[in-house]
Image: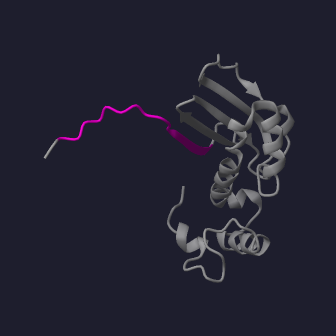
Amino acid sequence: MEQYKYNKKILFTHKYFLQININSNDELELRLHYLDTEGEGELLFFLEIEDFSIKKAEIKEYRIEGKKPRPTLRLKRIEGLSAYLGSTSKIMKIVTQEAGEIWAQFIPEAIKGVLQAEFYVASRRGFSSLEEYVQWFDQKFSRSCIYYQQPPSMVRSWLEYIANHDR
């Protein structure tokens, strides 16, 4: 049998990595790093934990195919907006205008990341327990398309799914 040789040119690759932490300023720090055949860069949001309002937003371009990367771009027009459900299209429109579609495409992913991080800061958002948070969330967003599976056909609740994942 002939050995497979990998000597092909890569035509396209596209990857991103999203990480959300609580930083030393006691705010959520969202970093979305993207890498593809045409460029590399990072989207950064610094958010208030209590309401997910954007305190500071930046884009850092490290490499753009055929262009010189611009210096760090501050997205002042989205500062003050909430990085939460209901704001996605508004933030995407502003980011498209200021930084281009390549960056706007990552806004839904960033907001999904905030939703997942919310579980771990629910008490800071005024909920007395995780059960109270999940009940509020299920009631508020029951008819939205954010679920990985729509109630009532869900096999496991969010609490069961995320159980024992304290951070």
Look at 53% across and 60% down and name the residue there. 166
Look at 82% across and 34% down and name the residue there. 97
Look at 68% across and 71% down and name the residue there. 134
Name the side, left or right, on which 75 lies relative to 38. Answer: right
Q: Position of residue 20 (x, y in %)?
A: 61, 45
Look at 77% across and 49% down and name the residue there. 83
Q: Residue furthest top?
A: 68
Name the side, left or right, on which 7 lies relative to 16. Answer: left
158 relative to 45, above or below? below
How many numbered dots are placed on residues in this image?
0
Is residue 2 visible to us here? yes
Specify the quadrant of the image occupied by residue 19: top right
146 relative to 70, above or below? below
Judge whether residue 49 is colored magenta.
no
Name the side, left or right, on which 56 lies relative to 164. Answer: right
Q: Which residues are magenta?
A: 3-21
